[in-house]
């Protein structure tokens, strides 16, 4: 009975496998990949008068980011308006990442150093808001910070301020919204990294007279680098393309890329321009993801190679030891 | 001494601050939904009036019905698709392109929502599909797939293929093996995945708003347009109900997963 054939549910059955995979592939292929390709095509067409497109090749949509036609002279004039929206989105996203890290890292550290039994509960508390309706969370934030909201009411009653703070519909509100929306995304990967960290290394650092800060800077941070990168990416990417926070908390006055794209398909109706903006955003996001995925796979490969090398050495040593 | 080095002062305070930031807006809205006065500064006593008012609002009624039926249908279909996909990818020999297929399944997670939204709109208009509940449903099925797939595939990885082999050694047909052996063991993963898919669909505003067309409206869309006019305690009441629904579903999904892990570690 040495080489018995052990059947499993799907062994050597390409037909069944393809049949089982096809619903997922068809749904994602037709209703996600095709639409994305169509956006790419539309970005090279001419805008129709009432939305939609005219099937004529053109690169106007991309040029529109930099230039605008002057009404009088019909010359193309450099206009930085759209670039400024990209810049503002970038700035908002970076600030949101910064604050998320500032709050997220100590939180993740605190949770990772709790007894194993309670860690799950803490994590769950951080996770719930992620699953809860983002629009409603953002609307709730607006409810609190608006001029006649509970926050201002509270501060006025305490006498800390004598007239309401106008936070709503400013850039501060938008950044606050991004921070609040994506904070859980920072904590989760950081927790996962810190949880795997070997805390005896901190003891070693301490024994070698490292200060707390130095131990953090030179021992903990480098060990959890991948977690930090993952957390920052997970906050940065959705912040960059955010729609709800700038729309609700910025009140349409603080445009970010996401709102600009949506506007082209709703109000001002220039589909190719909206498509071009979407293509640029998506290209940027995918490049960012691929770059870090590539780096991560490279570093894990080299770690694997090191481990393999060590194992080989060990085997050699024991073999040599055994032959004597 | 050990604990001292691990302990960084202030982390507990920051964690509490973090939770405060995350939860206070939701809690404040929930509290105001029970205030009998419209006022922000005065508490007029506890009341369910705003909930009753919200339930009797025809716009909210129809939007809630739309949201629930879309979320139910989308999560059911996405879960079925995810079960099939996890069987294909995790039961059987490794094959070429396996990683690519797994990547394809998580693709909807990587595309910024606003781009999924406009891409769906462009596509539906181009193939002359009338915008409405149907187009929302189609778009929702697609982005629910990865959320259903994650817990289902995690569970599937935890079930040893030995069970399949044992069943088939005893002359079970493939279908019988799946039906009586794999499926019951997979059930916690399926329930967990379906719950996640359900709330992801229920929560969506961006995609639905783009592909809904003129007539159809879901609950988040209705809340959005009501807020545009001004805050009312009714909005607080509906919001609180939606927050509660999501929390219950995530809680359920979490408990199923936790039971799963405990079983395995025992």
Image (cartoon, grey):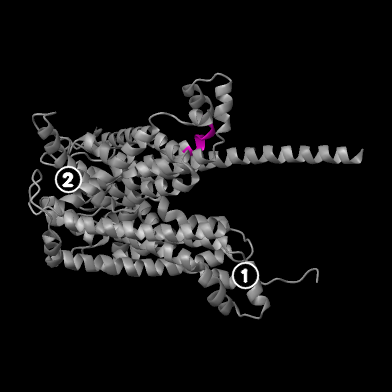
Q: Going by the image, does B230 lie left or right of B143?
A: left
Q: Going by the image, does B259 lie left or right of B18?
A: right
Q: Residue at x 11, y 29 (%)?
A: A159
Q: Residue at x 28, y 45 (%)?
A: B23
Residue B130 image position (x, y, % from top left): 26, 68
Please name the residue that numbered disc 2 is placed on: A143
Depth check, front residue: B106 or B75: B75
Above or below, B114 against A12 in this view is above
Q: Chain of mark 2?
A: A
Q: Chain of mark 1?
A: B
- Secondary structure of the residue carrying tag 2 is helix
For label 2, count other residues whose C-alpha is less than 10 Å away and answer few (under 14), some (14-19) or many (20+): many
Residue B109 highlighted magenta (yes or no) = no
Residue B233 image position (x, y, % from top left): 12, 54
Q: Residue at x 25, y 51 (%)?
A: A135
Q: Which residues are magenta?
A: A222-227
Depth check, front residue: A307 or A160: A160
């Amino acid at each position: 009975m040495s080489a018995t054939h052990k059947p499993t549910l799907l062994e050597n059955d390409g037909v069944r496998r393809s049949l089982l995979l096809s619903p997922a592939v068809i749904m994602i292929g037709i209703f996600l990949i095709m639409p994305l390709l169509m956006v790419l095509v539309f970005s090279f067409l001419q805008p129709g008068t009432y939305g939609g497109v005219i099937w004529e090749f053109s690169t106007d949509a991309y040029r529109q980011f930099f230039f605008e036609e002057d009404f009088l002279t019909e010359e193309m004039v450099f206009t930085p308006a759209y670039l400024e929206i990209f810049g503002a989105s970038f700035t908002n996203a970076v600030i949101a990442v910064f604050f998320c890290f500032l709050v997220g890292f100590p939180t993740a550290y605190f949770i990772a150093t709790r007894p194993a039994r309670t860690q799950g509960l803490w994590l769950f508390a951080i996770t719930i808001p992620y699953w809860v309706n983002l629009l409603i969370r953002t609307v709730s934030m607006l409810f609190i910070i608006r001029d006649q909201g509970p926050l201002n009411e509270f501060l006025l009653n305490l006498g800390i301020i004598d007239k309401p703070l106008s936070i709503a519909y400013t850039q501060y509100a938008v950044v606050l919204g991004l921070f609040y929306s994506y904070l859980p995304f920072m904590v989760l990967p950081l927790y996962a990294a810190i949880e795997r960290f070997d805390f005896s290394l901190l003891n070693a650092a301490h024994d070698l007279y490292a200060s707390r800060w130095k131990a953090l800077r030179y021992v903990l941070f480098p060990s959890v680098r991948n977690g930090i990168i993952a957390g920052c990416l997970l906050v940065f990417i959705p912040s960059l393309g955010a729609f709800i926070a700038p729309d609700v908390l910025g009140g349409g006055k603080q445009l970010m890329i996401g709102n600009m794209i949506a506007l082209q398909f709703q109000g001002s109706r220039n589909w190719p321009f909206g498509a071009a903006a979407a293509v640029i955003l998506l290209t940027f996001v995918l490049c960012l993801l691929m770059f870090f995925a590539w780096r991560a796979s490279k570093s894990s490969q080299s770690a694997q190679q090191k481990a393999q090398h060590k194992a080989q050495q060990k085997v050699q040593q024991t073999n040599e030891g055994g032959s004597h | 001494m050990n604990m001292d080095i691990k302990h960084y002062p202030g982390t507990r305070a920051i964690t509490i601050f973090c939770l405060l930031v995350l939860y206070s807006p939701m809690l404040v809205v929930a509290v105001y939904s029970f205030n009998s006065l419209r006022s922000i500064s005065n508490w007029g006593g506890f009341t369910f009036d705003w909930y009753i008012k919200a339930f009797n609002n025809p716009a909210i009624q129809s939007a809630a019905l739309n949201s629930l039926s879309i979320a139910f249908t989308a999560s059911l279909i996405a879960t079925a698709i995810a079960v099939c996909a996890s069987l294909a990818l995790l039961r059987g020999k490794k094959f070429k392109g396996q990683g690519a297929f797994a990547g394809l399944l998580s693709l909807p997670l990587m595309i910024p929502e606003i781009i999924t939204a406009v891409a769906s709109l462009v596509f539906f208009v181009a193939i002359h599909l009338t915008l409405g509940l149907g187009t929302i449903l189609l778009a929702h099925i697609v982005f629910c797939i990865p959320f259903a797939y994650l817990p289902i595939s995690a569970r599937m990885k935890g079930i040893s293929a030995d069970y399949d082999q044992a069943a088939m050694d005893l002359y079970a047909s493939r279908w019988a093996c799946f039906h009586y052996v794999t499926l019951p063991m997979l059930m916690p993963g399926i329930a967990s995945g379906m719950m996640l898919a359900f709330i992801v669909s229920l929560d969506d505003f961006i995609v639905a708003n783009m592909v809904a067309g003129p007539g159809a409206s879901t609950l988040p869309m209705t809340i959005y347009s009501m807020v545009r006019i001004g805050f009312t305690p009714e909005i607080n009441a509906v919001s609180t109900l939606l927050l509660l629904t999501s929390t219950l579903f995530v809680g359920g999904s979490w408990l199923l997963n936790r039971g799963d892990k405990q079983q395995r570690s025992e």
